[in-house]
Amino acid sequence: MVNRMRATRAHRDNRRSHHALTAIQTTLCSECNSPRQRHTACGNCGKYRGKTIIDMTAKIAKVEKKAKAKTETATAK
């Protein structure tokens, strides 16, 4: 069967004209000057608008503990 109400290329492309992706806007952190995404806490220092939101020392300790446990299990095998 033939699609009777087929959309033309122009109609299809006009509909898709709003599907373009935009680049993520970044700014520099006021505390550590590392690039960060707008309206989010800094991934480097964990601060947002001068306030500590994420405790980065605890987060780093957790990652190190997990890596240590992984190496211990790998050496045990």
Image: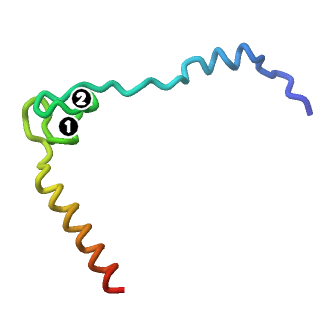
Q: Residue at x 8, y 40 (%)?
A: 52
Quadrant in which residue 61 is drawn: bottom left
Quadrant in which residue 60 is drawn: bottom left
* Number of marks in picture: 2
Residue indicated by mark 2: 39
Q: Residue at x 90, y 29 (%)?
A: 2
Percent position of residue 40, x then y: 23, 34
- Relative vertical location of residue 70 with respect to residue 51 in this rendering, above or below: below
- Relative vertical location of residue 51 with respect to residue 61 in this rendering, above or below: above
Percent position of residue 39, x then y: 24, 29
Amino acid type, label 2: His
Q: Is residue 15 left or right of residue 37?
A: right
- Quadrant in which the C terminus appears: bottom left
Residue indicated by mark 1: 42
Quadrant in which residue 36 is drawn: top left
Q: Residue furthest right?
A: 1
Label 1 sits on a secondary structure element that is loop
- Cβ–Cβ under 8 Å for marks 1 and 2: no
Amino acid type, label 1: Cys
- Relative vertical location of residue 70 with respect to residue 39 in this rendering, above or below: below
Q: Nearer the viewer, mark 1 or mark 2?
A: 1
Label 2 packing within 10 angstroms: few (<14), some (14-19), many (20+): few
Q: Residue at x 25, y 31 (%)?
A: 35
